[in-house]
Image (cartoon, rainbow, N blue to C red):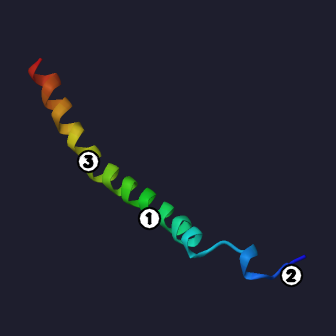
């Protein structure tokens, strides 16, 4: 029986990397959404006036 604190019982650095990468990717996605969202507002306002 192996010791509970054996190195094999803990996740590697790749798990920590993936846990850290997830919030970074989500933050970049929200930033992109925040930057692109205002583009649609002037287009539809202009379209309603013309039509």
Q: Are marks 3 and 1 in contact (CB under 8 Å)?
A: no
| Residue that label 2 marks | 3
Label 3 crowding class (10 Å Cα cut-off): few <14, some 14-19, many 20+? few
Q: How many marks?
A: 3
Outermost residue to the left = 50
Question: In terms of sequence position, does the residue under pointer 1 or pointer 2 come before the other?
Answer: 2
| Residue that label 1 marks | 24
> In this rendering, would 18 be left or right of 37?
right
Outermost residue to the right = 1
> In this rendering, would 10 be left or right of 31?
right
Q: Which structural element holds mark 3? A: helix
| Residue that label 3 marks | 36
Give the number of the mark in front: 1 or 2: 2
For image coordinates 52% across by 71% down, the residue present is: 17
Q: Which structural element holds mark 1? A: helix
Label 2 crowding class (10 Å Cα cut-off): few <14, some 14-19, many 20+? few
Q: Which structural element holds mark 2? A: loop
> In this rendering, would 26 be left or right of 11?
left
Residue 44 x/y as whole percent: 20, 30
Q: Are marks 3 and 2 in contact (CB under 8 Å)?
A: no
Give the number of the mark in front: 3 or 1: 1
Question: In terms of sequence position, does the residue under pointer 3 or pointer 2 come before the other?
Answer: 2
Label 1 crowding class (10 Å Cα cut-off): few <14, some 14-19, many 20+? few
Residue 14 x/y as whole percent: 54, 71
Question: Label 3 to label 1, Cα distance in Å?
Answer: 18 Å
């Amino acid at each position: 029986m192996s010791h509970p604190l054996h190195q094999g019982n803990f996740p590697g650095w790749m798990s920590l990397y993936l846990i850290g990468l997830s919030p970074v990717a989500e933050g970049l996605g929200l930033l992109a959404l925040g930057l692109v969202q205002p583009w649609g507002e002037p287009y539809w306002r202009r379209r309603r006036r013309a039509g």
